[in-house]
Amino acid sequence: MVLLYHHAESIGLVDRPDERKRHVGNIPLIGGLAAFFGVIVSMCFEGQSLLFTNVLLGTGAVLALTGALDDRFDLSVRLRLLIQTAAVLTMIYCTGIYIHTLGHLFGYNLELGALGIPLTLVAVVGLLNAFNMMDGIDGLAGMLTLVSIGGISMLQGFSHWHSIILLLLLAASLLPDLAANLDLIGRKVFLGDAGSIMIGYFLAWTLIQLSQQSHPYLSTVDVLWCVALPLLDTLQVTVRRLREGKSPFKPDRGHIHHIMMDAGLSAHTTLVALIGLAMALVFMGMLTRHLAPGSNLLTFGALSVIYVALVGRVYRAQRARKTSPLATAQWLVPIARKSPAVAHFLAPAMNNYEEHDEENEQKAAESSKR
């Protein structure tokens, strides 16, 4: 990472602030590349030489390079999707692994056959872009990765740790980036598109492999709960942008972390709250996996509808009133006053709202005296 840091400016791998990105100064986008090199070196010492792992690392290298080039030259969405599609199809062709079954749901074994190939393409491309879109505040994408890997470990059982050795090495390789990203050590660096895309790609294929083998460690619904928050937020952003007649890939400040910060919460509070939410969703998945087959899928579907509707409503309220922190605070203050736990996270937004409310009352009193 140190070597990449000193050359980041000269090769143009730096993130510059703009109206959507509110960091200070030019920040090197080398955290993801450093983590990928760490995984490659670790796998060499680990000694595994499986076809699945080799092809995954090879196609992952192509995507990491594409992400780095996107950070440098801002590649078109069409070109990025084309390269991502080629990587997924290469994995399917070389390994023969794809989503061929949805498992036992509603009393039936749902076999997909060849229809599983386009579903696999959508799933992998969707998840790698989901993590890319969630990489909006310091530490969020990296911490969500650790939550997902922890969730996979718990759902499949810690005794099967060897089946996710690549993800465990990825988690270890991300720790230096997280420490630098959160200003715990050295100078700040960002994960970059190379890192967020690599994370989503490795997670997607590992989850597919675990759920599609003859004796699966995870069900297809377990997979959804392991990466629930990135999936839910990408779903709500996609639905909203399509309803507005925009491209799903057109960036804006409509992700959950943007909405929370525009409501007056600090980046640190937002990070803690979202990681807590991601962990709660994984725990919910652990509880619902014991329900009747299909019921856990219905639970995830109902949660998706609620999330899309609720977050979309808050986003529209912020935009409509053009005073984002006060607008959202006004809507959430009654809830916060009834719940001390919620009030703790919403304290900055509530303070702003109450100060604004007091100013209005003073102005009204002064005008009435006149």
Image: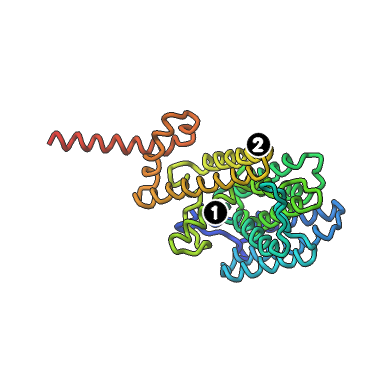
Residue sitting at x 80%, y 43%: 161
- Looking at the picture, tell me which residue is in the foreground, 317 or 28: 317
Binning the other alpha carbons within 10 Å of mark 2 as few (below 14), some (14 to 19) or many (20 upward) gives few
Which residue bears the numbered disc 1?
Answer: 235
Relative vertical location of residue 14 with respect to residue 268 in this rendering, above or below: below
Q: Amino acid at mark 1?
A: Leu
Residue 361, given in percent of the width and then of the height, sits at 25, 35
**Quick check: 193 left or right of 264?**
right
Residue under the point 26% across and 38% down: 360
Point out the frontmost of discs 2 and 1.
Answer: 2
Give the secondary structure at mark 1.
helix
- Quarter placement of the N terminus: bottom right
Name the quadrant of the C terminus: top left
Q: How far across and down, in percent of the image, does residue 281 sit?
A: 61, 41
Q: Residue 6: in sight, yes or no? A: no
Q: Position of residue 76 (x, y in %)?
A: 56, 70
Q: Is residue 87 above or below residue 302?
A: below
How was this image coloured? rainbow
The CA distance from mark 2 to mark 1 is: 23 Å
Earlier in the chain: of badge 2 and badge 1, it is: 1
| Displayed quadrant of residue 330 | top left
User: Few, some or many C-alpha atoms within 10 Å of disc 1 (few <14, some 14-19, many ≥20)?
Assistant: some
Q: Residue at x 67, y 54 (%)?
A: 199
One can see residue 58 in this view? yes
Residue at coordinates 73% horizontally, 62% vertically from top-left?
113
Residue 102, image x and y in percent? Answer: 70, 53
In the rendered image, which residue does mark 2 sit on? 287
105 displayed left or right of 165 = left
- Which amino acid type is shown beneath numbered disc 2? Leu
